[in-house]
Image (spheres, helix red, strand yellow):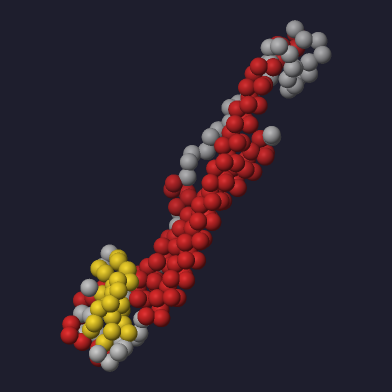
Amino acid sequence: VTKSDLEKLKGTYRQLTKDAHSAKEKYRDAMVKEYSEITSLLTDEIVKVHKEIHTSIDQIDPVSEYEHFIEVHKSPETKEPNVEFDVSLLEETENLQANEILWNNLTADSLQAMLKSTSDELGLTQQSLRTKEDLMQDLENKLDESTKTCEKKSEYVATITDKKWILNHEDVSLGELLGKGNFGEVFKGTLRDKTPVAVKT
């Protein structure tokens, strides 16, 4: 295993880590958009909050959001040690050329230890890559499930005209719980005229 191959594997690992983070952010955005779409607003105060949520979503710019993220949080670069060949060794070895390593009883253990260390590091890198690949697949599956759930729940949501933003409790019959969030619980409901709605409590 050469140093060049190891650097390529490290580069692949960094790219997969970045892709996994990007997929996670897309999944979060999908969840926020789903919640904002199924939320039914019943008071002026919640109408205002709902508009602020929509405005915040529209203002999210993924490019500028993480523009300097890597520069700020990246690990410091490890400097390679400066190694120089000891020319005085040539005085004791007849056929050894400069910048060459002689394989003998004195160097064998050191070189084998370096090979084992490099092989172990390569194994750990490959294992980490497989773990990141599994994580990416899991995030993609969750994102697909979230999209399907959003499409399915849209069957139960009806648009309420501006005149019906504020409703009396007697006008709505609550049904099953659709979901929970930071702003409360959302139930499936039915108006007196049999119109299906989503009701936030």
Q: Which image quarter is the N terminus in?
A: top right
Farthest right residue in view: 95
Give the side of residue 75 with respect to residue 100, left or right.
Answer: left
Pick whichever, 4 or 138, lies toward us.
Answer: 138
Residue 2 in percent (x, y) is at 69, 34
Q: Which image quarter is the C terminus in?
A: bottom left
| Residue 108 can be seen in this image | yes
Q: How many marks?
A: 0
Residue 123 in percent (x, y) is at 60, 36
| Residue 52 can be seen in this image | no
Position of residue 179 relative to residue 189, above or below, is above
Pick whichever, 68 or 188, lies toward us.
Answer: 188
Give the side of residue 123 with respect to residue 179, left or right.
Answer: right
Farthest top residue in view: 92
Give the side of residue 59 with respect to residue 107, left or right.
Answer: left
Q: Quadrant of residue 194?
A: bottom left
Q: Which residue is drawn at the image coordinates 41% and 62% (left, top)?
A: 28
Q: Which residue is drawn at the image coordinates 43% and 75% (left, top)?
A: 152
Residue 8 in percent (x, y) is at 64, 43
Q: Which residue is drawn at the image coordinates 48% and 41% (left, top)?
A: 75
